[in-house]
Image: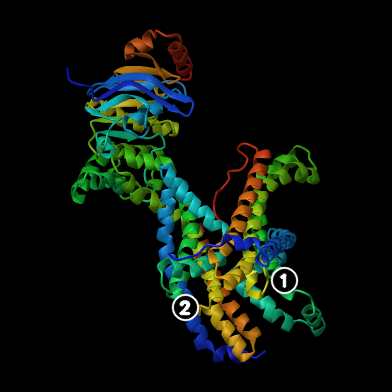
Amino acid sequence: MTQPIIDIKQVSLAFDKFKALDGVSLSVNKGQCIVICGPSGSGKSSLLRCINGLEPFQSGDIWVDGVGVRGCKNLPALRLSVGMVFQHFELYPHMTVLENLTLAPIKAKGMNPSEAKKLAMHYLDRVGISNQADKFPARLSGGQQQRAAIARSLTLEPKAMLFDEPTSALDPELIAEVLQVMRDLAKDGMTMLVVTHEMGFAREVADEIVFMDHGQIIEQAPVTTFFGAPRTERAKDFLQKILSKI
Amino acid sequence: MRYEFNWGMLTQPPYSEWIIDGVLTTFHLALICWVLALTLGIMIGVCRVSNSRILRFWGTAYVEVFRNIPLLVQLFIWLFVIPQLLPEDFSSWWNRLDAVPYWTAVVGISFYTSSRIAEQIRSAIMAIPQGQFKAALSTGLTPFQMYRYVIMPYALRIIIPAITSEFLTVFKNTSLALTIGVMEITGTTRKIEAWSFRGIEAYAVASLTYVLTTLLVIAFMTWLEKKYYIPGLIKRDTGHH
Amino acid sequence: MDWAVVTANAPLLIKGLITSLKLAAVAIALSFPLGCLVAIGRLSHRAWLSKLCGGFVNVLRSNPLILILFWFYFLMPILIGKSINDLTSILCAFVIFFGAYFAEIIRSGIQSVGHRQIQAGLSSGLSYRQTMQHIVLPQAIRAMLPALTTQCILVLQGTTVAYVVGYDELLHTTAMIAERTGRPTEMYLAVALIYFLICYGGSLVSRKFEKGQGQ
């Protein structure tokens, strides 16, 4: 059996006295799309930040493509294998879209600038905004900015992608274009770990749903099982609240 | 490094007396200037935001003149130039005053500081959201009640940190008065250094005065802010002045 | 009033002005990089470095410039073991003093960029240094331009303090002329005008940078 791309074992994370994560374990295999959902403060975003070493966790370990995160001596190199997309896009406002995409390939991967540019344009095209390449982020709509941010991560050709509430900061009419890009990515076989409230997306695209609360994984099940017959009370409760909104 | 320390000399006359005088002079000079600057500064600050174009013009002119000329140059002008330009009677009265340098320093530092305070008052008044005025009036409060219960508490919380840190600026600026002959602490320690060649000990006393005062004032300010803190009311900026 | 005194001594005044401007320029050129280093040190995760830089900034901002000048003027010959050039002592004092002020401006400029931009940079495989260099500092400097300009004007005003150690910058030159010719009124008013024009002009530039922020 091939090893999981992301393997999380018994990870605990605490900020001062607050326990953000409590003994969390999760495996993500190649090509899987796993959606993490749960109430605010349940630790979902913290978990993502532990995976690429942005958040130093206190116990347990995470292996990304076989490399342990906790004792990792070269975090920048590890981060090249897992891309991250943020809630507020976090494009660099002082660079054009194209420069945003080529910065890391040139500086972190040591790529040749013209090669990086070609690769960047390829991914901009893939997310549908190649005509925005020379614009500054402020000139793009929210949906375009987030698509650019996804392209920025794709340009590093990672083994997996982490999405931290990618559509939560978008106006409703702009959410669809971003979800479409994510849908296409999943179809093309990208390994994805997505924190989101978009249950429609989850039902359609995800392989498994993970429900978190208070820093722990309460329930983890294949999509149909989770939506059809959630086992735990908390999950049932959460689903009811979320779905009644749609 | 060859240097013979002699801290003991600081505790003996005449140095000990000079030091005490120097510290006291620094403090009372700073306090007088600060109070005068506050009074003048509030008036000019209000002019700067007034509805009258003339008042606004003169307020702006005042502020721009006093903050774009170095304080040391201003002190020299007050010392050498202004007495020449004033009427005979006033000049002769002024020149016969005890401690002309001291009062010159008071005038010079007060005017300079008042322009800075005017700017802070202006920022504070402009920082209060217009909506606060409208909301208060629309609930039936009279203008006076609006100022008393809504605007002033808000404005004070913005102004007090700025004005307290302005005191520290004045406190440090008193050191420039040594150039016109005022024996505040920095001037005193320079004199001690000239007499005894023990510069480290002497200047350490001066630095200690400034650093301790700064720590005390900041502690007081922090205590004051904590006591009157309203969560989310004002985002504090740890910027420079 | 006899303004001919001013015009007669204009060459000397210009020389003094150039000296002041040069002093300010060199001080800024050296204290700004120092400020950058101290600011980054202050924001470091290593507690000892953060506290050291914080202490440096706080001590220097608590002391008046003139006292720092006296410290260096007195201490440098002792420390180095031989009597050194006046200008070196003066410059050291200025660079260390204004370095602390620049450090504060730079620190708050960096903090205004926000930690999420840093996370975005780091998560794309850039090292901390690369993230600072390409992502944080360019944005921070843009945000800090008004404050930095104002601080540069303050450096120029600060050069007048070198008067007390007899350095022949503009104020000292003016004082000498005033004494020699017995006409302080005209001379000091003239020099006040010179400083006013330069500093006011600088403040207009700073205001222009501030307006440019509202994109």
Query: What's the chain of the residue with tag 2?
Result: C
The answer, for residue B239, to whether it is visible in the render is yes
Location of residue C158 with respect to C114 vertically, above or below: below
Q: Nearer the viewer, residue C49 or B168?
A: C49
Residue A117 placement (x, y as % from top left): 22, 47
Left or right, C214 with reference to B231: left
CB atoms of marks 1 and 2 within 8 Å: no
Kind of residue at disc 1:
Tyr
Left or right, B98 with reference to A31: right
Query: What's the chain of the residue with tag 1?
Result: B
Residue at the far left in the pictured view: A1
Label 1 crowd bin: few (<14), some (14–19), many (20+), radius 10 Å: many
**Secondary structure of the residue carrying numbered label 2:** helix
Left or right, C183 with reference to B143: left
Residue in view at x 33 percent, y 19 percent: A25
Left or right, A126 with reference to C42: left
Which residue is denoted by mark 1 in the rendering? B102
Residue C133 placement (x, y as % from top left): 34, 51
What colour scheme was applied to this rendering of the protein? Answer: rainbow
Q: Give the mark toward the camera: 1 or 2.
A: 1
Which residue is denoted by mark 2 in the rendering? C19
